[in-house]
Image (cartoon, grey):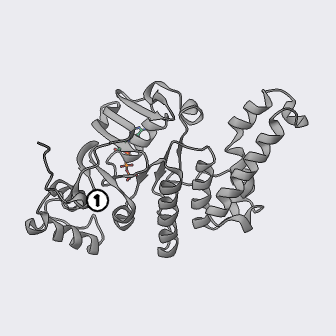
Amino acid sequence: MKEVSTTPPELVIPSGADPLLTVEHLTMRFGGLVAIDDVSFSAGKGEITAIIGPNGAGKTTLFNCITGFYTPTVGRLTLTARGEEYLLERMDGFRIAQKAHVARTFQNIRLFSEMSVLENLIVAQHNELMRASGFTVTGLFGLGGYRKKEKEAADLARYWLDKVNLTHLADINAGNLPYGDQRRLEIARAMCIKPTILCLDEPAAGLNPKESSELNKLLIYIKDEHDIGLLLIEHDMSVVMEISDHVVVLDYGSKISDGTPLYVRSDPNVIRAYLGEDEDEALPPEVAADIAKDFDPENREGV
Ligand SMILES: Nc1ncnc2c1ncn2[C@@H]1O[C@H](COP(=O)(O)OP(=O)(O)OP(=O)(O)O)[C@@H](O)[C@H]1O
């Protein structure tokens, strides 16, 4: 007889029914410092997986391993997408972007500031354009399929400009955009590589509430309409709780919790990591109060 689960659906830990990225026993050491310590989890397609944890927990190091900036000391990172399987820990960073289509944004925005907004989005597609040129002067004369590819690249750039509300600023130098616009442009640029997975390192940092809410809508749009996986490092708990399907919590390099936002926010391990034993300065008071409320055993029924 089929077993019936009594766990409320909102508390069911994502099982990775359609795993896109599988991280197994990932460890990253810098000399004697263990930045990531035997971390395993999976991130699904069509899901937003948030990676949270206090400062120095190892979140950015995890992104650096996934995107090839670092070669992990130990562990396997398998990306399964578009009928292929990529072992990311064995690939060079540029191949991870070019072949596995893993895209990322950075904590400190890294746009081509002297290029226009539109050019930033065209440059992101140079791999495809170079391929279409056959790495010859074909591109220069617009021969063969190059002209068609060039038009497709411009169309895709305009599509994403529209989605991030920057069409009217297409010809402005990226470095002259206001901060919030630069953050959205970075996401648009990442989307121009047609990613299988998009890794966002603190996309809401420095945004005002209106910009933050627009960002949430954009990320949900990307998830729903483009059916890719999103990995999100974020300190803003309201963003995490609002848009994530799945949350992985790191502390001192180890995974201490893994589940739905509702599950994680009431996990005593997480509360301890954020609040410490006897101080509550790590989180804004309203979030601390919220977590403390969830820590109440009466609210943990069914977990
Ligand atoms: N290249 C490196 N060399 C030596 N130590 C490093 C290096 N990169 C990161 N670390 C260390 O690894 C640990 C994890 O750092 P990491 O930047 O991944 O944390 P984080 O969770 O992203 O922190 P934050 O939220 O402050 O950005 C820290 O102790 C950091 O000092």
Q: Position of residue 82 (x, y in %)?
A: 51, 35
Residue occupied by mark 1: 261
Residue at 39 percent across and 62 percent down: it is 243
From what the image shows, is residue 223 above or below residue 215?
above
Residue 146 position in % (x across, y down): 81, 36
Indicate whether 289 appears above or below 58: below
Q: Is mark 1 within 8 Å of ligand 1?
A: no
- Which residue is most to the front? 1
Count the labels in the image: 1
Residue 297 percent across, percent down from the top left: 8, 65
- For the C terminus, the image quarter is bottom left
Relative to 157, is 47 on the left or the right? left
Q: Horizontally, is 196 left or right of 269 in the view? A: right
Task: Name the kind of residue labelled 1 in the image.
Answer: Pro
**Residue located farthest toward the right when viewing the structure as drawn:** 141
- Farthest left residue? 297
